[in-house]
Image (cartoon, helix red, strand yellow):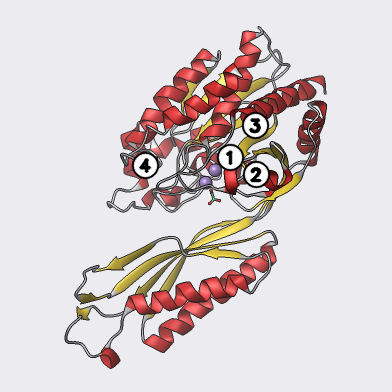
Amino acid sequence: MRLPRIVIERCQYLARCTEEPGAITRPFASEAMRCAHERVGEWMSEAGMTVRRDNVGNLRGRYEGTADATLLLGSHLDSVRDAGKYDGPLGVIIAIAAVQILLDSGRRMPFAIEVLAFADEEGLRFGSTYLGSRAVCGSFDALDLDRTDSGGITMREAIRAFGGDPDGIDEDRWRGGSLLGYVEAHIEQGPALEARGLPVGVVTGIAGQDRHMLTFTGEAGHAGTVPMDRRRDALVAAANFVEAVAGYAEGHLGLVATVGHLTVRPGATNVIPGEVTLSLDVRHADDSERLLASKRLLEIAAEIGNHRHIAVEASHVTDNAATPCSPRLTALLVRAIEDLDHPVVELASGAGHDAVAMSALTDVAMLFVRCKGGVSHNPAESVTTEDVAVAIDVVSRFLELLAEQ
Ligand code: GLV
Ligand code: MN
Ligand code: MN
């Protein structure tokens, strides 16, 4: 249990790399991320990897093999606001542990292993998703560089301040020759494994998602003097919309839709809200169902706006199609789990992962690790040392099976 315990301790250590004392908040290109890079870079070096940081801010560790092809392993180091310890870091640190096992036994595989610790999966700082993995795939959108964070800093400035060259992101794209695939271990973020009493599961595919920003513009005014029938309260319209989103998703099987962030301006007790900006996140395993739902929800926003004399503007932030995992790599993960005498369960992922972006570059597969109560995006995220031990063994066995092919 030495290595699994180290993995847990490392996840706990990274919790100290945060921009909010007492909580875990580690955005893209932040000082908190720099702190995480220092430690993760050391752990990669200790595991025999050469380490470099690319322009967008991914940390990359490479363990050479005896032949040219490369297998990519990894996950992300950024977090949501007030996050748990394991969403993202666990996959990176399990990957490093699997390489450490090879180093300790003096082994090289017939392929190189590159561990990718991605810079931005959650999109906390700029509302974007998969900035790091998109850069590796060559699908980074340069228009994103003009996005601003809540403090008015552009992504371009943030990347430069972190030490990268925003105009050199194209150099981050994979140029290392033939790829065998990308494999990501991640906490399940749902309750299925716990309900079945299983430590790990294999992922069949990842649900599609789109994200939007909506601005409701009314008129600010005096909370004590403007009569109720003369108001154009942007927050009342936004609240109607939040309720409509939940009601719509509750009525459509397989659909989940969330308003997770609101900004109310001017934001004072005695001022009628003049403007509300809110986020909308829509997901479904079936892309056509999802796109239909997003279209209808935006229409509903416009209808609410008309009814309340509030202008509504919507902008599309991201759109990711549902991503199937590779049958070839998934079959190897299944065999690895069977070889270790664990029952195999296949699961779909409702959460997004870097594997979505990576699927544009190479075959992808994912291993889920049971997490307590299925809780994630919450400080209560928890995994057991025993389950982490199984996950490390499965990844190690997977490497053996891949080497035999
Ligand atoms: C990432 O965690 C997402 O699914 O939003
Ligand atoms: Mn997450
Ligand atoms: Mn994640």
Would you name the residue on which mark 1 appears? 137
Would you name the residue on which mark 2 appears? 360
Residue at image coords 58%, 43%: 372
Q: Position of residue 318 (x, y in %)?
A: 52, 57
Q: Quadrant of ligand 3?
A: top right
Q: Which part of the image, by quadrant, shows the C terminus?
A: top right
Nearer to us: label 4 or label 2: 4
Q: Earlier in the sequence, mark 2 or mark 1?
A: 1
| The image quarter in which residue 329 lies | top right
Query: Residue 387: which numbered mark, if any?
Result: 3
Q: Is mark 2 within 8 Å of ligand 1?
A: no
* Cα distance between the residues tagged 1 and 3: 31 Å
Q: Are marks 4 and 3 in contact (CB under 8 Å)?
A: no
Q: Earlier in the sequence, mark 1 or mark 3?
A: 1
Q: Position of residue 89 (x, y in %)?
A: 51, 34
Q: Which part of the image, by quadrant, shows the N terminus?
A: top right
* Cα distance between the residues tagged 2 and 3: 30 Å
* Cα distance between the residues tagged 4 and 2: 34 Å
